[in-house]
Amino acid sequence: MEAERTEIQPGVGAGEPPWSAGVARRATGELEVAGVPVSDLAGRFGTPVYVLDEADLRARARAYRDAFTRELAPSSVHVYYAGKAFLSIAVARWVHAEGLRIDTATGGELAVALRAGIPGADIGMHGNNKSDAEIDRALAAGVGRIVVDSLPEVARVADAAARRGVRAPVMVRVTTGVHAGGHEYISTAHEDQKFGLSIAAGRAEEAVAAVLARPELELLGLHSHIGSQVLEAEAFTVAARSVLELRARIAETHGVLVGEVDLGGGYGVAYLPGEVPLDPAMLAAELARTVREVCAELGTDVPDVSIEPGRAIVAPAGCTLYTVGTVKPVRATDGADRLYVSVDGGMSDSIRPALYGAAYTATIASRASAAPPVRSRVVGKHCESGDIVVHDVDLPADVAAGDLLAVPATGAYGRSMASQYNLVPRPGVVAVAGGEARAVIRRETEEDVLALDLG
């Protein structure tokens, strides 16, 4: 049976990337998540369905908290979970219970964090185009920080704080010029994009001066985010040096040495067998060494540090279950045969392959097979030829309608970027822990879709 498992899909086992620690294959060949067989999950909750391994998610949150706290001591460390990756009431409570704060980027994410009972002081508010209502709600909630992203926003946040008679804690998001990330759309620190204030062009220092000129604002520090799905620590250390040098210049010019720097997130994960994710302990050690060395060179105190992992915590903790439908052989553009395996979801629940060309893997999850592997492409049910879930994967030649298929590492940006394209209701999210499963976001129905249509 072990030989069959390896033949079907390498890397399926407890703790082997890209699967969560709770995933294992039973003697029958069926996958289980945290002790619950996938056939039970599909039977109870339907497919497609996103499945979260709660213990795995919590362990990853602790790993970042512990590694950075240890390496940067005695400086304070704040780990913010980047809610954009995936946020629900349950997930917000889990990560907060593990000592993390919550980073939100919209009013909706802020609403979820507040509904989860997260104290305002443990919430950050992000966004490059915050509405007046979002700023006002953040101030009303007493958020621990608002990350200002432009010069006009400095004045807008200050004016909103003045109307409320409060002093708003802010950080200034700066653009370091470090270009990093798996795709140009998720690289966020180069000059020609919408986020932050350029260090090179002097706009970051201009924004800091504007903040210091408004008594309604409290300057907490500087914020940098260089991109997403970054797999090398060097990019983060280069960006950290740039931010720390800016901090020293601000101290020299304005007489204010800000107390905190946020070095962002974007830590890469494994999506395919054999890929190596960024290790929290290694990353923490590299960044701590850089921060100390640069501060020593500049003659400044070591600041408090905050980071914002999102994908790195939730992506590997999740997988998506589908049911196979139509299977047909197709002649690929290179002349070889390829098996097209259609599933009951697609780009509405997994947009990243179509949007970024993101690579995933998959395995038949409901049984074992001794059939030889066949070059396959997993596709969805939507009216787009680009509706691809997995571009290339070897699946057993006897894959057939009714089989359950599992795609790992979908905890981030699956449900959070899901749509109702073709008016397909969005899948639910199921949490599994200790042999028990429960829905944390229910599956949408056609009635949910129709309820929005006012006729």
Image (cartoon, rainbow, N blue to C red):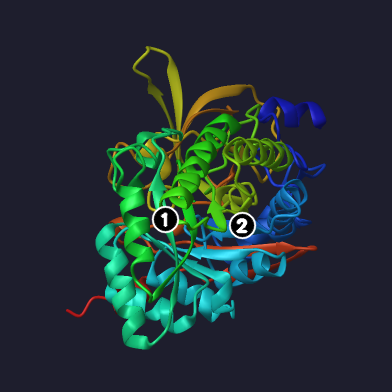
* Apparent side of residue 293 relative to residue 423 in the rendered image (left or right): right
Quadrant in which the N terminus appears? top right
Q: Quadrant of residue 57?
A: bottom right
**Residue 179 versus residue 115: which sits nearer the camera?**
179
User: Which circle, 2 or 1, is nearer the viewer?
Assistant: 1
Residue 196 can be seen, yes or no: no
Give the image location of residue 3, x and y in percent.
Answer: 79, 26
Residues marked 2 and 1 touching at CB (< 8 Å):
no
**Residue type, label 2:** Val
Label number found at residue 208:
none
The alpha-carbon separation of the residues under discs 2 and 1 comes to 50 Å
**Residue 50 versus residue 272: which sits nearer the camera?**
272
Give the image location of residue 165, x and y in percent.
Answer: 38, 87
Label number found at residue 254:
1
Q: Is residue 354 above or below residue 421?
A: above
Q: If you read the primary sequence from the N terminus, does the residue marked by circle 2 or circle 1 appear first?
A: 2
Label number found at residue 51:
2
Element at label 2: strand
Give the residue at the far left of this rendering.
Answer: 455
Element at label 1: helix
Quadrant in which the C terminus appears? bottom left
